[in-house]
Image (cartoon, rainbow, N blue to C red):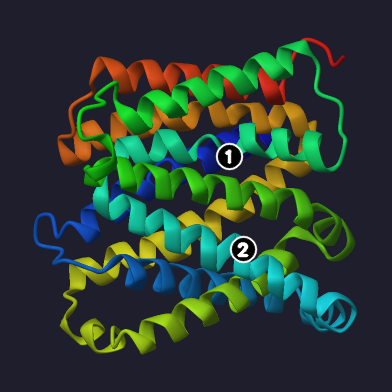
Amino acid sequence: MKRGYLLVAGAIVLFSTIEVVSKYLQAGEGAAGQVGPLQVATLRFIFGATFILALLAGRRQGRFIVGAVREDGLPIALLGVVGVFLTFFLLHEGIESTSASTAAVIFSMNPVFTVLVASLILRERLGLAGWLGVGLGLLGAFIAVTGFRFSGLFSREDFLGGILVLVSAVTWSLYTVYGKRYSERHGSLVLSFLTMVSGSLLLGILLAVQGGWGELAGYNVRAWTWLLYLGLVTVGIGYILYFEGMRRVPASRGASLFYLKPVLALLFAHFALGEPISYTLLLASVLVASGILLVTFPPERG
């Protein structure tokens, strides 16, 4: 069981770098050259899907892909629309307009939203500690989005960016809740691969409509290196570590480790991008982390 926790923790460390590396690329920091948010989202999941396909082929599990498409092709494709296309289009567009640390803290709300969605839609019971966690998480998200600065709030780019990231956390939670049955039926890696295929296909089509594929020729080696990192490491290896770890530990206890993400992301953004750690964002991260702990690993369920 100890190895399971280590695997989940390793995955969360990788997940904590996503917003930081994405901001680095999208802002054109250093020598990486600027990469558009839609390009980051599209290439990230094309590389990630390729990695997982190679893994499934190496395990001789390709037949499970065919079986999943035959049995549940349409609902799985729709899950890809919500969980990959919509979620990560919104996330990367939001990162464009706000800081990496703010985006990471807000997107870390997804375990809280997942429990809330499961409670409201699937009628899963949520005890007192769970509802307290939802409240703390929502308060943390409110602080992260507004920064307690209300003058000209609706015209600020960072506010609009924060709202996009917040909506992406909600859509990812919908994907998590509704994807559970298909993950149990076909396996987490098969579901991840197929949803990545449908989601990245739509991202690629949108990129083509916007004429963005031609920009790829101008990316330098450093930009491609970080794009590969986002796809192969944070998506490919990160998903494998997470699912393998969750297989070895109780689901609620494994998911509770997500409280690490907002804190780690603040540190990564500070040291890698020089983003300041404000008191308001630190408070928001503590509230979100506390909310995650309470909803995923409450003392008791009522």
Mark-to-mark CA distance, 2 and 1: 14 Å
Check the image and report above or below for 129 versus 172. above
Instruction: Residue at 25% x, 82% y: name it.
Output: 216
Q: Is residue 263 shown above or below 77?
A: above
Indicate the quadrant containing the N terminus: top left, top right, bottom left or bottom right: top right
Q: Quadrant of the C terminus?
A: top right
Determine whether, in the image, residue 135 is placed left or right of residue 215: right
The amino acid sitting under disc 1 is Asn
Tell me which residue sits at (22%, 31%) in the image.
270
The amino acid type of the residue labelled 2 equals Val
**Residue toward you, 49 or 262:** 262
Can residue 61 be seen by looking at this rendering?
no
Crowdedness near tag 2: few (<14), some (14–19) or many (≥20) residues, C-alpha within 10 Å: many
Q: Residues within 10 Å of mark 1 (few under 14, many from 20)?
A: many
Along the line of sight, the residue nearer the viewer: 156 or 13: 156
Image vertical order of residue 220 relative to residue 93, above or below: below
Instruction: From the top left corner, tell me how far across and down residue 238 is, in percent.
Output: 54, 52
Q: Residue at x 35, y 70 (%)?
A: 38
> Which of the 4 quarters of the picture holds residue 145?
top left
- Residue 118 percent location from the top left of the image: 78, 39
The residue identified by callout 2 is 82
Which of the two discs, 2 and 1, labels the residue nearer the N terminus? 2
Q: How many marks?
A: 2
Q: Which mark is residue 110?
A: 1
